Image (cartoon, helix red, strand yellow):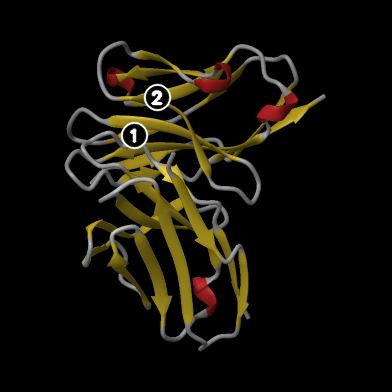
Amino acid sequence: AQSVTQPDIHITVSEGASLELRCNYSYGATPYLFWYVQSPGQGLQLLLKYFSGDTLVQGIKGFEAEFKRSQSSFNLRKPSVHWSDAAEYFCAVGAQGGSEKLVFGKGTKLTVNP
Amino acid sequence: SQTIHQWPATLVQPVGSPLSLECTVEGTSNPNLYWYRQAAGRGLQLLFYSVGIGQISSEVPQNLSASRPQDRQFILSSKKLLLSDSGFYLCAWTPGGGDYGYTFGSGTRLTVV
């Protein structure tokens, strides 16, 4: 069965600094990988996804992620963080097949200092 | 355009009381539907999913159940709530076909007291 690990529970960065959120997955086949963002008390919004092809994926809000098969990682990056990026971020892996089930990591809470 | 409605937004229920959370999707047909629960520090846990009317798959054995009485309606129920059922419940849908294009509802905060 697939699983996702987000090693960092909470990260604090200064506004304008670069950001990298870590995600490691476990899955026997080629994974479908996703990053979602959640503002407090809200649902989740898709930032980006990887199915195949170019291992560097561009998403919304200036985010990107890189798939590294050798490291089983799919880290999320942003070159310059804005105060509005403060939220919780979830990495997820999808099982192939008709159900389109997602397995989520436990999330990383991002705090942005002015 | 497609929209997803989930209600109520918040709910406080006593232990042992029944539960019914409803989720409806508009603007699409035959969606895949999902119920996830989010507990603090535990990420999102898939509870149930459905790929068609009357087709329910359970991921976690518990005192919750789900039903899909209509194509775009997904209901999460319990006959007797436990304290451990407290959490943030999210409904989501995908169009199917391997797109994984999840759209989440705004969630229900359930507190069992």
Q: Residue at 28% of width from left, 59% of height from top?
A: B71
Q: Which numbered circle lies on residue A74?
A: 2
Give how far across and how far down residue B93 sits, in percent: 37, 48
Q: Which mark is residue A25?
A: 1
Q: Judge whether B35 appears above or below A56 on screen.
A: below
Label total for image: 2
Q: CA distance from mark 1 to mark 2?
A: 8 Å
Q: Residues within 10 Å of mark 2 (few under 14, many from 20)?
A: many
Circle 1 Cα neighbour tier, 10 Å, few/some/many (<14 / 14–19 / ≥20) = many
Residue B38 seen by the camera: no
Of residues A82 and B106, which is closer to you in this image? B106
Q: Quadrant of residue A75?
A: top left
- Residues flagged by tags 1 and 2 on a common chain: yes
Q: Position of residue A47 (x, y in %)?
A: 49, 28
Taking the spot 55% from the left edge, 70% from the top edge, the residue there is B86
Q: Nearer the viewer, residue A25 or A55?
A: A55
Quick one: SS at disc 2? strand
> In this rendering, would A90 be left or right of A39?
left
The amino acid type found where label 1 is placed reads Tyr
Give the mark, 1 or 2, whose residue is nearer the N terminus: 1
Q: Point out the residue furthest to the bottom here.
A: B16
Q: Is residue A90 above or below residue A82?
A: below
Mark 1, secondary structure of its residue = strand
- Whole-percent x and y of residue B92? 41, 50
Looking at the picture, tell me which residue is in the foreground, B109 or A8: B109
- Residue B1 appears left or right of B67: right
Quarter of the image with the C terminus of chain A is top right
Residue, far right = A114
Q: Does the residue at mark 1 contact the one at mark 2 (Cβ under 8 Å)?
A: yes
Chain to which mark 2 belongs:
A
